[in-house]
């Protein structure tokens, strides 16, 4: 299983010609997990707080662009991560604590992700 941020997404189709039924659908979107120190590794800090999206309205267009459909609702579900990736993330957080409020990587992860972390074996 690939690592990533998992979101439950509801979207609608609005064809220019004709119609579809149903016009609303639900799916799961996996946003890529970026390894530190690459650009984007702070995604969890910028978008999540206590396991919830900080601003669904601002995040919907990002998912809409990624999926190519009109997203009507998006909800964070969990982050799926391998143990080595989690350890790498913890080291990066510890080395950048000035970017966060809490003073340990565990506290930072909890503040942003809550208990929504699923550690998996890398296949």
Image (cartoon, rainbow, N blue to C red):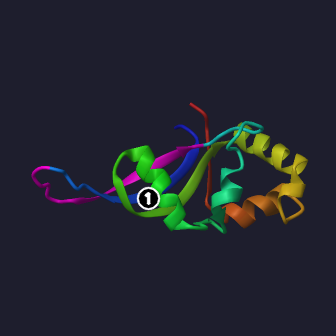
Near-viewer residue (32 or 39): 39
Residue farthest toward the top in the current orientation of the protein: 123
Q: Quadrant of residue 20?
A: bottom left
Please tell me whether residue 58 is drawn above or below residue 119 in the rendered image: below
Please tell me whether residue 120 is drawn above or below residue 13 in the rendered image: above
Residue 103 highlighted magenta (yes or no): no
Q: Position of residue 105 (x, y in %)?
A: 83, 55
Q: Which residues are magenta?
A: 17-32
Which residue is painted at 25% across and 55% down in the image? Answer: 13
Residue farthest toward the left in the current orientation of the protein: 18
Please tell me whether residue 27 is drawn above or below residue 74 in the rendered image: above
Taking the image as shown, residue 49 lies to the left or right of residue 68, namely right
Quadrant holding the C terminus: top right
Total number of numbered discs in the rendering: 1
Residue farthest toward the front in the current orientation of the protein: 16
Q: Is residue 115 visible?
A: no
Circle 1 sits in a helix, a strand or a loop, which is it? strand
CA neighbours of label 1 inside 10 A, class few (<14), some (14 to 19), many (20+)? some
Q: Quadrant of residue 109?
A: bottom right
Q: Is residue 66 visible?
A: yes
Q: Position of residue 102 (x, y in %)?
A: 85, 65
Q: Quadrant of residue 38?
A: top right
Q: Position of residue 19 (x, y in %)?
A: 12, 55
Which residue is painted at 82% across and 50% down in the image? Answer: 93
Residue 19 highlighted magenta (yes or no): yes
Which residue is painted at 84% across and 56% down in the image? Answer: 99
Q: Position of residue 28 (x, y in %)?
A: 41, 52
Which residue is painted at 88% across and 50% down in the image? Answer: 94
* Residue highlighted by disc 1: 8
């Amino acid at each position: 299983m690939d690592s990533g941020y998992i979101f439950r997404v509801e979207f609608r189709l609005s064809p220019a010609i004709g119609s579809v039924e149903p016009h609303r659908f639900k799916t799961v979107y996996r946003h890529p997990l970026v390894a530190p120190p690459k650009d984007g590794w702070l995604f969890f800090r910028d978008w999540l707080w206590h396991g919830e999206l900080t601003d669904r309205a601002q995040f919907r267009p990002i998912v809409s662009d990624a999926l190519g459909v009109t997203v009507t609702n998006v909800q964070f579900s969990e982050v799926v991560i391998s143990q080595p990736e989690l350890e790498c993330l913890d080291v990066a957080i510890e080395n950048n604590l000035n970017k966060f409020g809490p003073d340990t990587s565990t506290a930072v992860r909890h503040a942003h992700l809550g208990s929504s972390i699923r550690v998996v074996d890398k296949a």
